[in-house]
Image (tube, grey):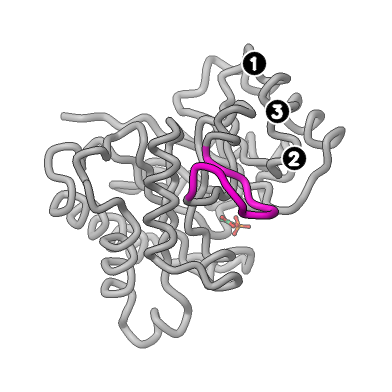
Amino acid sequence: MITRRKLIAGNWKMNIMLSEGLKLANSIDEYINSQESPDCDLLICPTALILSDLSEKLINSSIAVGGQNCHAEISGAYTGEISASMLKNSGASYVILGHSERRHGLNETDNMVQLKVTAAQNAGLNAIVCIGETENERETNQTIAVLTKQLENSLPSDSSILNGTNTIIAYEPVWAIGSGKTPTNDQITEVHNHIRECLDKIIGEQANRIRILYGGSMKPDNAASILELDNVDGGLIGGASLNAKDFCAIVSAID
Ligand code: PEP
């Protein structure tokens, strides 16, 4: 049987400047070092502006750093954009792609996400590909259809390059992000099992190695019950990752 090591990833979004970020990363690192090494991978995704400093600070730590987005092109006349290799060069090993704040706030399409995932993987980054339904889509029973389409169209068409290291899926219901609302455990299980089946169809043998994270109002008080569900291989944490105590409590919720 394949065991997938859980991943707990913090998405700091457009929060936290350099000195605060270094302090927060340090507190998380100290906590991790004070424990028997946590049985999971850890990731922090700060603003790209402090990626280099954070990755230097965490050079001897087990905490990885990642970007929150990248451009699909390798380089060129794309004012204000950041390429995957620039993230890599700044010390990132992961990048979050297709976050709902980009899909819905900045009109990012599946096709754009697909190109970014390809660029990220070609640059040697592990792509965390986010998918999720809106509240209206859930209420009108479209959840499974919406997620299937997002998954099929956001992953690179050459699925032979996808594996359990360079591809991570994050199920993030749009209505759960930052709202304090979460799906029931049965709803999360239904979706994660479905994603696993879709991955199986798209990728075949490697599908069982790919981690599927849950994201959306994961907090210390609900983390343990979500993280123990079948096919939940970790969490993508927004608000609660901005506070060392809450983020570490979520890490501790993994048994
Ligand atoms: C997110 O934005 O990826 C997220 C999960 O946010 P929150 O934990 O704040 O709901």
Separation of residues labelled 3 and 1 (CA atoms)? 10 Å
Observer-nearest of 205 and 183:
205
Q: Percent x, y for residue 15?
A: 77, 50
Observer-nearest of 157 and 74:
74
> Does the CB distance between marks 1 and 2 fall below 8 Å?
no
Amino acid type for the residue under numbered disc 2: Leu
Residue annotated with mark 3: 52
Q: Percent x, y for residue 112?
A: 43, 61
At label 2, counting other C-alpha atoms closer than 10 Å, the crowd grade (few under 14, some 14-19, many 20 or more) is few
- Residue at 38% x, 60% y is 185
Please provide the residue range marked out in magenta: 73-84
Residue annotated with mark 1: 59
Find numbered disc 2 in the image and state the secondary structure of the residue it sits on.
Answer: helix
Separation of residues labelled 2 and 3 (CA atoms)? 8 Å
178 to the left or right of 227: right
209 to the left or right of 220: left
- Residue at 83% x, 42% y is 17
Residue 80 on the magenta segment: yes
Find numbered disc 3 in the image and state the secondary structure of the residue it sits on.
Answer: helix
- Mark 3 or 1, closer to the camera: 3
Q: Specify the label residue 49 is tagged with.
A: 2
167 to the left or right of 198: right
Residue 155 on the magenta segment: no
Q: Percent x, y for residue 21?
A: 78, 35
Find numbered disc 1 in the image and state the secondary structure of the residue it sits on.
Answer: loop
Observer-nearest of 142 and 53:
53
Mark 1 and mark 2 lie on one chain; the one further toward the N terminus is 2
Amino acid type for the residue under numbered disc 3: Ser
- Quarter of the image that includes the C terminus: top left
Amino acid type for the residue under numbered disc 1: Ile
Count of number-bearing discs: 3
- Residue at 54% x, 40% y is 9
